[in-house]
Image: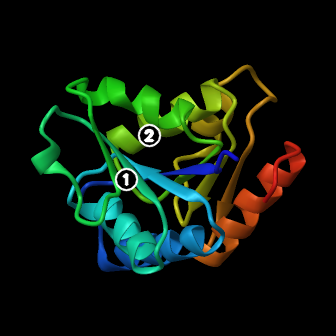
Amino acid sequence: MSRTVIGVMGGSRADEKTLAAARELGRLIARRGWVLLSGGRPTGVMQASVTGAHEEGGLTVGVLFDDDPQQAARGLDIIIPTGMGAARNVVNILASKVVVACRGNGGTLSEIALALRFGRPVVLLDFDPGRAFLDGCPAEGTARWKIVPDAAAAVEQVAAYLAADGQRP
């Protein structure tokens, strides 16, 4: 039986509120039995979400920017060193059923754009990059995204997207 992969994206640098939300998100993803996939760096949202999932015994996957597995977040179960740089963002998105984006910068925005372009639903956890950006990424009217205030609401929205797509939430 395959497991549902949820991508968690966000900045390599983040404020305490964002880090706390990412860690709680990781915990909640693990409690649902979903696999947490991230960019795998040992900093920011990536490390915080992996730590949360790891604390709950969840399965974690990191798709790395570079080719050195020593550059991976602590607590990852599966490390995929790519050496692809930012091109690994495509792998992160295509491997995810739903993408949750925490606050971030250019890399996070590119992952959101790719998710919307490839038809992956996006949950924005206390992060609003702007309606024009969100609606302009795919063909107009086809984007599925929602801004939510906290990790619990993010996980509920992920479950709703999975159910709408006929998958086990």
Point 64% across, 50% down: residue: 3
Q: Say what amino acid the circle numbered 2 marks.
A: Leu
Q: Label 1: state its secondary structure.
A: loop
Q: Is residue 146 left or right of residue 81?
A: right
Q: Position of residue 93 (x, y in %)?
A: 52, 35
Q: Residues within 10 Å of mark 1 (few under 14, many from 20)?
A: some
Disc 2/disc 1 C-alpha distance (Å): 7 Å
Q: Using the rendered image of the protein, determine whether residue 148 is visible from the camera's viewpoint.
A: yes
Q: Position of residue 72 (x, y in %)?
A: 20, 52
Which quadrant of the structure image shows residue 60? bottom left
Which quadrant of the structure image shows residue 95? top right
Q: In terms of sequence position, does the residue under pointer 2 or pointer 1 come before the other?
A: 1
Point 37% across, 53% down: residue: 104
Point 25% across, 23% down: residue: 84
Q: Which residue is mark 1?
A: 104
Q: Position of residue 1 (x, y in %)?
A: 70, 47
Q: Which residue is mark 2?
A: 109
Q: Are marks 2 and 1 in contact (CB under 8 Å)?
A: yes
Q: Residues within 10 Å of mark 2 (few under 14, many from 20)?
A: some
User: Foreground: 152 or 15?
Assistant: 152
User: Foreground: 132 or 57?
Assistant: 57
